[in-house]
Amino acid sequence: MTKALELAQEKGLDLVEVAPEGKPPVVKIMDFGKYLYQQKKKLQEAKKRQKIILVKEVKFRPRTDVHDYEFKKNHIKRFLEQGNRVKCSVFFRGREMTHPELGYDLLARVCQDLVDLAEIESAPKMEGRNLIMYLTPKK
């Protein structure tokens, strides 16, 4: 260990302990400041390349009118083209809970209209008073 420390001082570098648990401990002679700088740059580069995917939500009601449906469908289309995931939910109120098939039909219609843009990530399922389905953009 002392011989390695002398070698590092001669070269003007640092002695860095790589594996302190080893018998004997493993050390490396390097410029530690330069090493830290390179690690920081690698992290910045990786962060720059990553893509953030958001989950956008579009809410429907079981008796959503044709114009409102088209308007919301266009929003879903825009979100998918931007590369975001979309959460489509149908909210049931009061006696509407007795007809969940209306919600399933509505979400099936959304899938049918956006078949060229979206893949179904999770099929429609009831969560309390909400019927929820996730769509992801096709690759």
Image (spheres, rainbow, N blue to C red):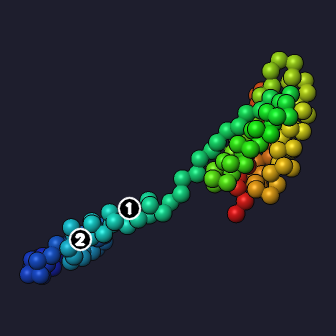
x then y, percent, for residue 52: 54, 53
Q: How many marks?
A: 2
Residues at marks 1 and 2 touching, judged by CB atoms closer than 8 Å: no
Residue at point 76%, 54% (across, down): 118
Q: Is residue 91 visible?
A: yes
Q: 109 above or below 128?
A: below
Split into 4 quadrants, where in the image is the C terminus? bottom right
For disc 1, the marked residue is 44
In the drawing, does residue 76 fall left or right of residue 35? right
Q: Residues within 10 Å of mark 2 (few under 14, many from 20)?
A: few
> Camera-side residue: 113 or 121?
113
- Which residue shows up at 16% across the image and 72% down it? 14
Residue at the image point whose x is 27% and y is 70% from the top: 35
Q: Position of residue 82 (x, y in %)?
A: 63, 53
Q: Amino acid at mark 1?
A: Gln
Residue 98 marker: none
Residue 19: x and y in percent read: 30, 70
Name the residue located 90 percent from the left edge and 24 percent from the top edge.
98
Q: Residue furthest top?
A: 94
x and y, in percent, of residue 102 in the image = 90, 32
Name the quadrant containing residue 7: bottom left
Residue 67's quadrant in the figure? Answer: top right
Which residue in the structure is indicated by mark 2?
Answer: 34
Residue 126 in view of the camera: no
- Name the quarter where the N terminus is drawn: bottom left
Name the one closer to the observer, 131 or 67: 67
Circle 1: is it few (<14), some (14-19), or many (20+) Cα within 10 Å? few
Q: Nearer the viewer, mark 1 or mark 2?
A: 1
Is 122 on the left-hand or right-hand side of 100? left
What is the residue that sits farthest to the front in this orientation? 67
Secondary structure state at the residue bearing disc 1: helix
Q: Nearer the viewer, residue 59 or 92?
A: 59
